[in-house]
Amino acid sequence: MPNTRGLLAIGFAVVCSLSLMGLPHPYKTYVAEQSRAGLLAASQWMFSRAIRYARNEEKSQFLLTQNVKLALDNMRLREAAWENVRLREALVFHGSEGGKGVIPAEVIGRDPDQIYDTIVINAGYDHGISKDMPVVTAAGLVGHIAQVGDSDSIVQLLMRSQVSALVQSTRVQGIVSWTNGQRFRLRFVEASSFVREGDRVVSSGLGGRYPKGIPIGKVVEVGQVKRDLVFQQVFIESNVDFPNLEEVFVIVK
């Protein structure tokens, strides 16, 4: 089949050549000019298509680059908006403390496997920080200073501590200890005590480590265990986002 097509093409070319040779000179000139014009037009068309294609490719690349830049700018703006919200909350908290006795700090490191439940902040002896100072956010109690360096400190999070606390509305007292996640238990609450879901739990000030009145969380579950007729089961949930802490405050005693 390919050989037949080749022979047909050769035959057609020979016939055209013989036909052109037999034409008068003016017709030969006319055919040559028309052929040249056709080839020139075809060349120009192909060249313009190539230029248009190149321009479209360049335009597409430019638009794609602009889309990526806009997406990055959008992400930066969203992050700046969230940072603005956090800083506003921090400023409100700082203002409520009168701006005295509170040292702001940023979280610069954390325990990767969360075995020791610690974070590292960028303030140490250079900011007047000392061991056992309480650490808080606008959302509530975070923990305390466990170790102090020249320009940084290690904060022991609330998960590894037991805090003397009380229910803000009824003044019922107990000891807060961690269970899992952001959930804690208010232990040693007598069965006769009145505690309801939604009650706020704050530090009681007993023990000397944490000042009185720092928010710890709110009551999310109240129950009674049949085998324990002395104490209630009271669970609270902290508003502090422990895994994602970025800014904290150290309370100077």
Image (cartoon, rainbow, N blue to C red):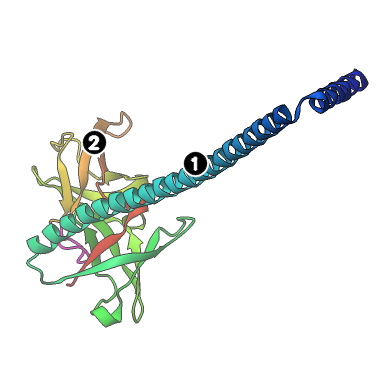
Left or right of 52 on screen, residue 204: left
Q: Give amino acid for label 2.
A: Val
71 versus 121 height, above or below = above
Report which residue position mark 1 lands on. Answer: 56
Give the main secondary structure of the magenta stretch: loop
Q: Residue at x 17, y 61 (%)?
A: 206
Give the camera-side residue of 26 and 193.
26
Q: Is residue 76 above or below residue 152?
A: above
Figure disc tally: 2
Q: Quick one: 8 or 207, which is closer to the camera?
A: 8
* Residue 20 vs residue 191, the one in the foreground: 20
The part of the image, by quadrant, that contains residue 51 is top right
Label 2 Cα crowd, 10 Å radius (few <14 / some 14-19 / many 20+)? some
Residue that badge 2 annotates: 220
Please state, as top left, top right, bottom left or bottom right, where the C terminus lies in the image: bottom left
Where is residue 240? Give x, y as percent: 27, 50
* Residue 231 in picture, x, y percent from top left: 24, 38
Q: Residue at x 15, y 44 (%)?
A: 200
Q: Which element carries disc 2, helix, strand or loop?
A: strand
Q: Is residue 247 left or right of residue 10?
A: left
Residue 107 colored magenta? Answer: no
Mark before the other along the chain sequence, 2 or 1:
1
Rendered image quadrant of residue 146: bottom left
Give the spatial CA distance, label 2 vs label 1. 61 Å
The image position of residue 56, as x and y in percent, is 49, 41
Residue stretch rendered in magenta on the structure:
204-212
Q: Position of residue 4 (x, y in %)?
A: 91, 18
**Pointer 2 with pointer 1, Cβ within 8 A:** no
Judge whether residue 212 can be spotted in this image: no
Q: Quadrant of the N terminus?
A: top right
Q: Amino acid type of disc 1? A: Asn
